[in-house]
Structures are given as structure tokens and as C-alpha cells.
């Protein structure tokens, strides 16, 4: 709701709420990761190094998936936009960042000889709390908005939000022509103010709950990998549900939004991983394994 925090006089430099919160999300996330990793007996310096590599990989991955999902609409006829300042300031796609982070973690952990499942467990709560703060940044900027609504929780974004991200503030700014006609009839005018589902806050609330659940689970963990797999299951479920209210124009697969389709794959992958880890745990605890 407040895209700009303040401007620095004489320098013509603006401090954006989104950028500040994203920076804060990485700092808090890395702090939580390092604390949990140290508690689990992992090398703190290696964890910081890994965190920086994961940060870079997540930024690159989020941008790559943004290009892929919006290629036809924004980039196929305008390659130069990929190298613009607006592209660098764009938030990217979370799942692209997640995939990039996983790939980087596998490579770096192998190089540093770090146990993947144990390290991933320490990272999962940090990812959740960092993502929570990042979604507050999305809300402040107006990106990742939801569908129009007349519900009590609907939010009317500011004109600065529209200028920065294109979030609709009136009916005629809705991206779908069918939506425009339906809501113009419902509200009486194409210039009527339109409220949107604050899907950024829906997801932020879910992530905060996930973070708390993961912290509690970490204290009572039964096997390595339990926390990161629980994170994947919980976040995939939350994102799948939130997408029903999100106005996501980035294409569909099998009547699901791109993010819902990836959420299904993530959920299935996490279930398979959980089954394999439980089976491995059972084998290691069996009497034959002990002899």
C-alpha cells in the first residue's frame, strides 16, 4: 500500500518499501538458518557461504522463470526489456527462485561436504520467514494481486501502486476484458474503484503459520529431512489454495495456473521424499541394521 518509503533529498534517490523488505527478508532468513544450523552442529561459516550462493541462485532462478512464463506477453518482441532497470527491480517468480536455490544447495553442499538433509532442515524455517517478509513487500508494492472482490477483506490499491506494478485501481484497468465487462456492470461504471483480494497477505499469513510449525517440529524432529519435506508439503498446499483468489495471468496447464501446477509437482515430490526418508529411517532402526 506504500510503494515508496521516502526520497533522499538532492540525490533524487527513492527508498522503495518492497526493496527494503526483500533485503530484510534475506537478512532475517539467513540469521534464522545460521542459528538452527549451529544448534544442529553445522559449520556456521559454511552455512553463511551456502546462504549467499543460494541467495544468488534464487534471484537468477526467479528471473528466468519470469522470462519463461511471460515470454509471449512481454519479452518475445522486446528482448531489450530483459536488460532494463524495470526487469532488475521486478520481483520474479518464487518457484523459479526455489528451484534455483535447490540446485545451488546440492552443488555447494557437495563441494563443502555438508549433509544435505540436515542442512536443508536448518534452512527451511529461514526460507519460510524470509518469504513471509517478502510477501509483505509484495503487498506494499501492489504486485502479485488478487481477483476483484466485494468482500470485507478486499483492498483498494493506490495510484502509485498502479504506476509501479500495474495493479488495477479502477475497473477499466483490469487486464481481462471479460472481467472488465462483468465488474463494470456490477459496480455501475468502468471508472468505479475496484477492490482486490489481498492474496499477498493470505500467503504471508500462511507462511507465518508454516514458520511457527517448522520451528516446533525442529525441536521434536524424528529424522533428518523431516523439516524441509514438511515445508514443501505445507507451502505447496497453501500456494495451491491461494492461487484460487490470485489474478495470475501467466498461463495455465491442465486447467491449473502455472503456480498451482508446480505446487502439485512439489507436493508429490515431497510425499515421495517423505516415504523414502521414513523407509530409510525404519531400515536403520531395524534389529538387522543394528547387528
Image: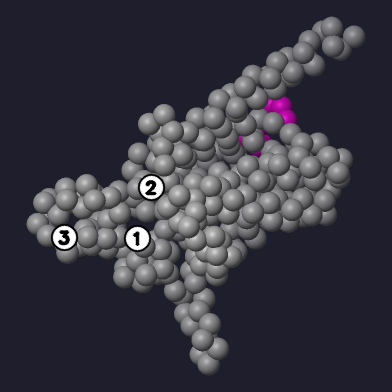
Q: Which is more toward the observer, 120 or 144?
A: 144
Disc 2 target residue: 249
- Whether residue 27 sits left or right of residue 149 in the image: it is right
Mark 1, Cα crowd under 10 Å, few <14 / some 14-19 / many 20+, is: many
Is residue 37 shown above or below 63?
A: above
State which tag comes first along the sequence, 3 or 2.
3
| Magenta stretch prevailing secondary structure | loop
Provide residue 89's location: percent of width, then percent of height: 54, 65
Q: What stretch is highlighted in magenta?
A: 217-224
The answer to which image quadrant residue 232 occupies is top right
Q: In which quarter of the image is the C terminus?
A: top right
N-terminal-most mark, 2 or 1: 1
Q: Which residue is drawn at 58% across and 58% down?
A: 25
Q: Are marks 2 and 1 in contact (CB under 8 Å)?
A: no
Q: Which of marks 1 and 3 is in front?
A: 3
Q: Distance between the residues labelled 3 and 2?
A: 21 Å
Residue at coordinates 55% horizontally, 44% vertically from top-left? Answer: 95
| Residue carrying label 3 | 190
Question: To which residue does mark 1 refer?
Answer: 167
290 and 207: which is toward the camera: 207
Seen in the image, is 8 located left or right of residue 50?
A: left
* Residue 150 locus on image (x, y percent): 20, 50
Residue 197 appears at what percent x and percent y?
Answer: 31, 50
Q: In which quarter of the image is the N terminus?
A: bottom left
Whether 33 is drawn above or below 168: the answer is: above
Q: In this view, does 166 lie to the left or right of 290?
A: left
Amino acid at each position: 500500500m506504500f510503494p515508496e518509503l521516502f526520497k533522499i533529498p538532492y540525490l533524487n534517490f527513492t527508498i522503495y518499501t518492497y526493496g527494503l523488505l526483500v533485503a530484510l527478508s534475506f537478512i532475517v532468513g539467513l540469521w534464522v538458518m545460521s542459528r538452527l544450523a549451529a544448534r544442529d552442529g553445522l559449520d556456521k561459516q559454511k552455512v553463511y557461504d551456502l546462504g549467499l550462493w543460494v541467495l544468488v541462485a534464487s534471484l537468477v532462478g526467479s528471473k528466468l522463470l519470469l522470462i519463461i512464463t511471460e515470454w509471449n506477453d512481454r519479452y518475445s518482441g522486446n528482448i531489450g526489456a530483459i536488460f532494463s532497470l524495470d526487469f532488475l527491480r521486478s520481483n520474479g517468480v518464487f518457484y523459479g527462485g526455489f528451484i534455483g536455490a535447490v540446485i545451488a544447495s546440492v552443488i555447494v553442499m557437495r563441494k563443502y561436504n555438508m549433509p544435505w538433509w540436515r542442512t536443508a532442515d536448518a534452512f527451511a524455517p529461514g526460507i519460510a520467514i524470509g518469504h513471509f517478509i517478502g510477501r509483505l513487500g509484495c503487498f506494499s508494492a501492489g504486485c502479485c494481486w488478487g481477483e476483484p472482490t466485494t468482500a470485507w477483506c478486499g483492498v483498494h490499491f493506490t495510484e502509485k501502486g498502479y504506476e509501479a506494478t500495474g495493479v488495477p485501481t479502477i475497473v477499466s484497468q483490469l487486464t481481462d476484458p471479460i472481467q472488465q465487462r462483468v465488474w463494470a456492470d456490477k459496480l455501475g461504471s468502468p471508472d468505479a474503484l475496484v477492490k482486490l483480494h489481498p492474496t499477498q497477505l493470505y500467503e504471508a499469513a500462511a507462511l507465518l503459520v508454516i514458520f511457527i510449525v517448522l520451528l516446533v517440529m525442529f525441536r521434536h524432529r524424528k529424522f533428518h529431512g523431516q523439516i524441509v519435506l514438511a515445508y514443501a508439503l505445507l507451502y505447496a498446499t497453501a500456494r495451491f489454495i491461494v492461487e484460487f483468489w490470485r489474478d495470475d495471468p501467466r498461463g495455465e496447464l491442465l486447467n491449473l495456473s502455472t503456480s498451482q501446477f508446480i505446487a502439485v509437482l512439489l507436493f508429490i515430490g515431497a510425499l515421495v521424499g517423505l516415504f523414502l526418508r521414513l523407509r530409510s529411517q525404519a531400515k536403520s532402526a531395524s534389529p538387522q541394521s543394528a547387528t
